[in-house]
Amino acid sequence: MMIDQGNKLKLLYLKELFEERTDTEHEITIKDMQAHLDGYGISADRRTLYQDIETLQFYGMDIEHEKNGRGYRLVSRDFEPYEVKLMIDAVSSSRFLSERRSRELVEKLKKLCSRYERDPIQRQLRLANRVKGTSKVLHINVNEIFNAIGNNRNVRFLYFKYDTKKQKSYTKRVYEVSPWDMLYADDQYYLLAFDPEEKKADKQFKYFRVDRMEKVETLEEQRTGGEEREKIDMVTRTKNNFNMFGGKIEMVTLRFPNFQFEMAMDRFGHDIIPMKDGPDHFTVTVPVAVGPHFYGWVFGLKNYVTIMGPEHVRQGMKDMLEAVGKRYRE
């Protein structure tokens, strides 16, 4: 290796060494640094290494010298070990990532820690025993849509659903829409897009499951629907759209027993205002996307939640219960 090139790479090799082999509990000495660099064919004396350490500190690396010892260590990083663990758990439990992709991302995340901090994370790592995605196209779709949004361009794609034979059933239409947001909910990625061909104004923004999209391509046409997008309260919309396919958002009053307050708060957010309703119950009035998924959620909670109003929402629940009862009486 040429001397000039070795000197240019030396700082990078030292940076890598500090990140890999030091933390608040582990240090390296000047001799360790020399041995590491020697493995790359680079020789360095103490004086130049002291200067290199100062350069890395000036660059922003939080390197400390052990006052009572001979070692140096990197005492802070962009992410604490527990933060890396949280990200790894999120990746490991995600349904839309394949098993292989999950493991690849986990390995990348582990590199944010020193080798010593990785050991306890590895021992605690358990890939959740749950359904994992198998679509390789998903990651390509996410990247294509992400770039289209960044470049203010429309996208074109095919859309499908699976039939009972597990075969893809494509819609007759080839969609050309304006992508505005990618949302992660219910273990799936969704695209919120403006559909200029939709005549009904309240249905122009639509959700598409990204893993149900094929042949996604970015078009030259610029996006439309920007003014309409500004009117959408995404926090409310995503928090209350049950499975992202809810109906019209309405203010609905629900009644719960007191011991279900945490469940209500988890579902509708910490800003809900409970109103006392007798000694054992409370009510909350929250924005809800009223539709089959909402009624199914209420049905699943049995006698733990009651729809108090509006009356047409109560009637919708009664109609669903009647239809279910009729099916099982036949």
Image (tube, rainbow, N blue to C red):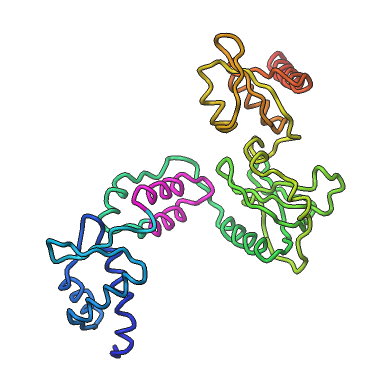
Say left or right for 306 vs 315.
left
Residue visible at 70% across and 19% down?
Answer: 324
Image vertical order of residue 246 relative to residue 169, above or below: above
Q: Nearer the viewer, residue 171 or 190?
A: 190
To which quarter of the image does residue 23 belong? bottom left
**Where residue 55 sits in the image (x, y, percent)?**
31, 75
Image vertical order of residue 217 relative to residue 163, above or below: below
Residue visible at 53% across and 26% down?
Answer: 263
Q: Nearer the viewer, residue 92 or 62?
A: 62
Say left or right for 179 vs 67.
right
Secondary structure mostly seen in magenta is: helix
Q: Nearer the viewer, residue 18 or 115?
A: 18
To which quarter of the image does residue 225 belong? bottom right
**Where residue 248 sits in the image (x, y, percent)?**
76, 35
Boundaries of the magenta span: 80-109
Residue visible at 55% across and 28% down?
Answer: 265
User: Where the C terminus falls, by quadrant?
Assistant: top right
